[in-house]
């Protein structure tokens, strides 16, 4: 904000008297501040000073694209490269967009319009690892909650079971509730922090899946009164090994009113980050076989399976053979 010249020259009456006694007129007194903006900015010649935030983002977007290796980009069966399609469209997009970070959100109609139906199906459905399968004991649990008799359901609900938390009890994973701060988010924001800078807080959510007595996080929950449509830390844990990084998945759970939706974020190919959303599941207002409670519980167990798979991937990063470890000639 450029101060008004009246603010800068307002002072004691003694100062005003000194100016008047020097023979200056009122117009001469303020002459140097006829153009305050030029006066205060005359020493700034950096182009960035006059660059809008979106222009700066577009410049960074272009620089990022130019550093990409075309041979490493995600090439579809049609021969088109996903990164190039995104760049050609988003380079003149003067508003914030997922695409400026090369993120594909499967719920974004605009992004979907850039590709043919066959290409979009390939982008959305590519599975780097097999989809997790339910354990037989979990299937039996889901059958148990598929009822349309209220008395039977009441009897089941008297059994000690809370849908979210106990599903993660035996994984060495804590579900941190109550607007807990994300350590991963805080570390990302402070990665270039200098000694004298204030430490920035991480984002707060309604739940964070965190390793017991550790800082490693596997996913988050966001809840709301009403339903509204709406990390690089794991990569470092894998020591940037490509074969492991491409198998990583981070989960998110959107929970509003009586509805629940599981999201997954992964890095399928090239330089692309992908967001996929499962179908919204709803706890029905009345008991029916078409919308059993089991569908909601299945989504929670699906999220659990992804966390287990991610933990296994991270644990493999330092796998070594015992003979290699004991070899005296190896450092």
Image: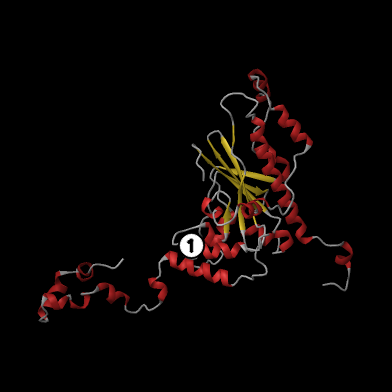
**Relative to residue 285, is residue 300 depicted above or below?**
below
Where is the N terminus found, in terms of image quarters? bottom left
Q: Going by the image, does 93 lie left or right of 158?
A: left
- The percent coordinates of residue 55 (x first, y second) are 44, 67
Q: Residue at x 75, y 39 (%)?
A: 134
The residue carrying mark 1 is 198
- The percent coordinates of residue 179 (x first, y second) are 53, 45
The quadrant in which residue 255 appears is top right
Secondary structure state at the residue bearing disc 1: loop
The quadrant in which residue 103 appears is bottom right
Q: Nearer the viewer, residue 27 or 70?
A: 70
Where is the C terminus found, in terms of image quarters? bottom right
**Relative to residue 289, is residue 108 depicted above or below?**
below
Q: Residue at x 73, y 59 (%)?
A: 244
- The percent coordinates of residue 143 (x first, y second) are 72, 29
Q: Going by the image, does 211 lie left or right of 104?
A: right
At label 1, counting other C-alpha atoms closer than 10 Å, the crowd grade (few under 14, some 14-19, many 20 or more) is: few
Q: Nearer the viewer, residue 83 or 236?
A: 83
Q: Nearer the viewer, residue 196 or 151?
A: 151
Q: Is residue 72 visible?
A: yes
Residue found farthest to the bottom: 22
The quadrant in which residue 322 appears is bottom right
Q: Residue at x 54, y 71 (%)?
A: 63
Q: Nearer the viewer, residue 144 or 93?
A: 93
């Amino acid at each position: 904000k450029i101060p008004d010249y009246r603010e800068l020259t307002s002072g004691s009456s003694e100062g005003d008297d000194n100016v008047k006694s020097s023979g200056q007129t009122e117009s001469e007194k303020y002459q140097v501040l006829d153009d305050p903006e030029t006066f205060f900015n005359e020493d700034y010649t950096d182009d960035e000073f006059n660059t809008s935030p979106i222009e700066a983002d577009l410049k960074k977007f272009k620089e990022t694209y130019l550093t990409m290796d075309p041979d490493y980009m995600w090439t579809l069966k049609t021969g088109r490269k996903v990164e190039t399609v995104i760049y050609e469209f988003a380079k003149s997009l003067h508003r914030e967009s997922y695409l400026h970070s090369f993120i594909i959100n499967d719920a974004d109609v605009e992004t979907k319009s850039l590709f043919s139906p066959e290409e979009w199906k390939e982008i959305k459905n590519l599975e780097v690892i097999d989809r997790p399968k339910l354990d037989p004991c979990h299937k039996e649990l889901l059958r148990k909650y598929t009822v349309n008799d209220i008395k039977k359901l009441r009897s089941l609900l008297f059994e000690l079971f809370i849908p979210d938390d106990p599903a993660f009890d035996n994984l060495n994973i804590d579900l941190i509730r109550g607007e807990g701060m994300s350590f991963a988010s805080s570390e990302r924001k402070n990665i270039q922090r200098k000694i004298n800078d204030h430490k920035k807080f991480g984002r707060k959510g309604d739940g964070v899946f965190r390793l017991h007595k550790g800082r490693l996080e596997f996913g988050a929950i966001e809840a709301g009164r009403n339903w509204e449509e709406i990390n690089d830390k794991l990569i470092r844990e894998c020591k940037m090994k490509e074969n492991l990084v491409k198998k990583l998945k981070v989960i998110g759970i959107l929970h509003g009113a009586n509805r629940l939706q599981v999201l997954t974020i992964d890095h399928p190919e090239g330089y692309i980050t992908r967001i996929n959303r499962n179908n919204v599941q709803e706890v029905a207002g009345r008991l029916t076989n078409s919308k059993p409670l089991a569908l909601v519980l299945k989504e929670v167990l699906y999220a659990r399976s992804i966390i287990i798979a991610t933990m296994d991937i991270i644990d493999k990063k330092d796998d070594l053979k015992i003979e290699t470890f004991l070899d005296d000639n190896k450092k």
